[in-house]
Image: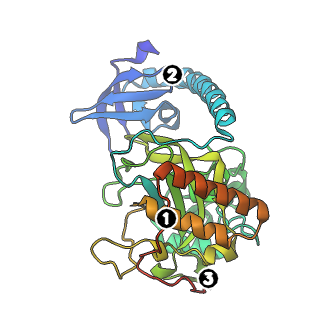
Amino acid sequence: MKRFLGEEVIIKKDNTRGVLKSISEEDGLIVVETPTRNREFEASTIIDGKLIFADEELQSIAIPIFKEFVCRIEEVREAKDNEAVEKAKNNFVCRIRRDIGDSNVAFKCTYCDGGKSADSVGFKAPCSEEVRNFNIKTRTWCSGEVCRCKKLANGDISQAEFDSKINPTDRKEFLCYESRMLLDWICYAGVEQKTGIPMKLNKAQVGSLAVMTTRPIIDGKEAPQEKTQIFGVFLIAKHNDVSDIGGSVTAHPKYRIELTPEESKKMLLWKYHANERNEEKAMWGSGLFRYLSDMECCQILRDIVNVVKDENKKELANEFLEQFQQETGIINIEEPRGAFKEQNFSL
């Protein structure tokens, strides 16, 4: 791969030109030196055409070489992940840093009812037609020109073409993060709406809690802010922050809990959380994530223990809570002080 170092490349997203400074043989990360800063990319961006060589002849030479390189990196990565999973299966991972304040993260997820059942809120397949049409009208990604859901709704592609690109076992073939969230158990920071720049999860870390939230769509209307539901939680086992990809957190193989639709209705984010400047108002704003305190997360885990019906899930939730309390040093769990003190809301 050294032959490509020093070559001029173009970042297609903003047509910025730079020089390929380094390629990591270990994790496949590419560093591009631009006039303003160094930017990081995954090697697969060369294959996808998001990062191209200015020399067209070199680009044609690079594609097959990078395809082989990416395959090799993914094989190594998968082997490492499998090894880590085996080691972590029954072990609660601990935090490395304790000096960065609140490192638990709540994610605002666009509602996706794909795969919804009595046991699952969805987030496992493409949205239903009703939810898809609503999201196309109201969500940035869903309304974008590259979104296949919008192309299907506009008649630009057929249902058969749409379905042919969906592979539940391959995370590369996806419509959006939400359509695979409870398959992959990965949450992403997203991008800044005005600039399109991927956001980082600067304070997130391994050993903290990730809380997945959403506002369901019923009869063509989105639930109000105060009825933002928690539909899943997990212990963060992996944290990535790559500059031009953005931040993400991956779930521990054991400490992850998915709530049923009925259980989720009883777990409302704003019972536990409040805005610093306006504590009585349940308003998230434009950001796709926010940080939660350890106490708030203990309160959430405690209530999940009480809410879940399945005995195996309840046993896991109780163990999860005990381990989290031990990790955070919280013995006595206070009563919630969120924007809404009552939990008995119904949709």
Q: Quadrant of residue 322?
A: bottom right
Q: Quadrant of residue 133?
A: bottom right
Q: CA gap, disc 3 to disc 1?
A: 38 Å
Q: CA gap, disc 2 to disc 1?
A: 44 Å
Using the image as rendered, state which of residue 132 and residue 316 is in the foreground. Answer: 316
SS for dot 3: strand
Q: CA gap, disc 2 to disc 3?
A: 47 Å
Residue at position x 21%, y 33% from top?
Answer: 35
Residue at position x 78%, y 64% from top?
Answer: 311
Disc 2 + disc 1, Cβ < 8 Å: no
Q: What's the residue type where badge 1 is placed?
A: Asn
SS for dot 1: loop
Give coordinates of residue 284: x percent, y percent: 39, 71
According to the image, label 3 marks what residue?
218
Using the image as rendered, state which of residue 120 and residue 190 is in the foreground. Answer: 120
Q: What's the residue type where badge 2 is placed?
A: Glu
Residue furthest to the top in view is 3
Q: What's the residue type where badge 3 is placed?
A: Ile
